[in-house]
Amino acid sequence: MICLELAPVFWSILFILLLLLYKWNYSKPKKNLPPSPKKLPLIGNLHQLGPYPHRSLQSLSRHHGPLMLLHLGSVPVLVVSTADAAREIMKTQDLIFSNRPKLRIPDKLLYSCKDVSFAPYGEYWRDVRSICVLQLLSNKRVQSFRHVRETETSLMIQKIKLQESSSVVNLSDVFSTLTNDIVCKAAFGRKYNNTNSNSDGQQQCFKVLLAEFVELLGRFSVGDYIPWLGWIDGINGLSRRVEKVAKEFDQFLEGVISEKKLDKDHKGSDFVDILIEIQKESEDTSHPIENDVIKALILDMFAAGTDTTSSALVWTMTELLRHPNTLKNLQNEVKEVTAAGKEEITEDDLDKMHYLKAVIKESLRLHSPLPLLVPRESTEDTKVMGYEIAARTQVIINAWAISRDPLLWEDPQEFKPERFLKTSIDFKGVHFELIPFGAGRRGCPGLMFAVAVIELALAKLVHKFNIGLPKGETEKDLDISEVNGITVHKKHPLLVVINPR
C-alpha cells in the first residue's frame, strides 16, 4: 500500500504519465490502412479462413474491398481480390512485393527453400531462376521434350484402349500417372514406379510419395503465424510426416544424382543431366552449386509439373462432361483438324485448335490450380491504391476470386469457353483478369511445359474416344466439390465410361 504522505505525488505522476500517453497516441498521424474485419485476441482473423480459404476470403472481400488487411496470428496479411489491385502488386510494384515469407514446411521440404518457388528474393533466387528460365524451361528446351509428351500421351490412349469397352475408367488416376511419367522422363530420363526402399524394407510408390509431398506443401503450420504455438505441429504428427517425406525424397534424389555422376558414358539431356553440368561449371566459381540445389529445383519441377497439371486436366474434363454440347463442339474441331485421315495428333496440330485453347482457358478461369497464389512479402514500406502497407506484410493474391469477378466477367459462374473466342485475354501474366500461373518476377516459369501437356492430352482423348458418365448418372449428378490444399483438387475421382470413336 502507498503511504499517505506519498499518495498525492504518486497520483500526480500517474496523471502526468496518462496525459502524455494520451497526447502521444492522438498526436501520431493515423495511418491509412486497408479495411479489416474484426479480429480476436492472439489468433487475429485465423478463425475466418475456414476449410476453403479462397472462398472465405472472396466473401470477406465483398464486405471490405479489393484490398483487405487481415491479421493471421501476429502476421499482417494483405489480401488482393481484384485485377487492378493484382496489377499494382505484380507489375507496378513487383520489385517491392517479390519476396517470399519464410514458412516452416516448404523450408524443410525444399532444403531451406533453395528452389525457385519459395526462395526469398535476392541474388540466389535470381541465379536459380535464370537456370530454370534459360536452361530447363526455355521454349527451345520445352520443345526438346515434345517427343516425351507425344509418346506418353499415346501410351495413355493405348492403356485406355486395353480396358473393356464401356468399363469405368478413373480419369483422375489416368491423368496423375500421365503427368508423373512425363515429368519423370523430362527430369530423370526414365520413369520411376518406386523410390528406394524405406526403413521398413518396403517399396514406396513414387507417385504416392509425390502426392504426399504436394499435400504437405499446402498444409497450414500454426507456428508460422503464432510462433509460441509451434509445438502443436509436433503433437498432431505434422512435423513427423514432413520429416519422413523430406528424408525419403532426399534419399531417392541423392541416389539418382549419384547414379548419373557415376555413369561416365551417359550423355543425356534431362533436367538432372543439365543441372549436373551446370554444377561442374560452377566448381571453380565463388558460388558452387550443391546437390541440395539440384534436388530442390527438381522437386519444384515435380510439384508444379505433375499435381497442378493433372488437376487442371481433371477439372477441364469434368466441365466438358457437365456441358455435353461443349464436348461435342470440341470433338468436332478435333475431327476437322484431323479430317485428312490423320491417326495421331501431334503438337503441330494444336495451333489450329482454337476452341480447345478456349476450353482450357475457361477451365483455368473457373478452377485455378493454385486459387491463392504462393504468398508474397513486401520488402519495404509502400502505398498501394492509397493505402499504407508496412514492410514484411504478407500478401495473398486470390486468383480464384479475380477470375470470378462479375465486374470483369459476364456470367462468371458459368462455363462458357466461347467467351475466349472473342477476346485476346490470356493466362501468360499480361492480363490480370486471368492469372492462374501468377505474373511478374514470381510468375510460374513452367507455364509453357504444363500447357503443352494439357492441350495434347485433352486433344488426343476426345479424338480417340466418346466419353460419358457411368450408367444411371447425369450431368447434374457429377460432383464438383473440392479438396483444399496448395492445389485445389476435385474431392472425388472422375469416373467415366469411355468407348472408342
Image: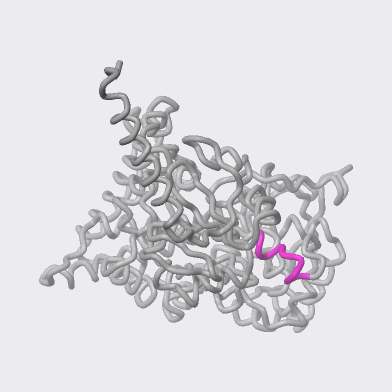
Q: Quick check: is 270 in the magenta stretch? A: no
Please name the predominant secondary structure of the magenta segment in the image.
loop
Q: Nearer the viewer, residue 164 or 292?
A: 292
User: What residue is drawn where x is 37% and y is 70%?
Assistant: 132
Residue 198, quarter of the rendered image: top left
Membership of 403 in magenta stretch: yes
Residue at 50 percent across and 47 percent down: it is 71
- Position of 244 compared to 451: left or right? left
294 w.r.t. 171: above or below:
below
Instruction: Tell whether 258 sits left or right of 447.
Output: left
- Count up the numbered dots: 0
Instruction: Estimate the x, y position of residue 223 in percent, counting from the top left.
Output: 40, 38
Query: What percent of the width, then of the height, locates residue 39?
Result: 56, 41
Q: Determine which quarter of the picture holds residue 425.
A: bottom right
Give the residue displayed 35% in from the left and 70% down from the top: 129
Image position, residue 48 (x, y; %): 61, 41
Residue placed at 33% from the left, 56% from the top? 296
Q: What's the coloring here?
A: one colour
In the foreground, 326 or 50 = 50
Residue 341 visible somewhere in the drawing: no
Which residue is more in the foreground, 464 or 144? 144
- The part of the chain drawn in magenta is 401-409
- Is 6 displayed left or right of 393 in the figure? left
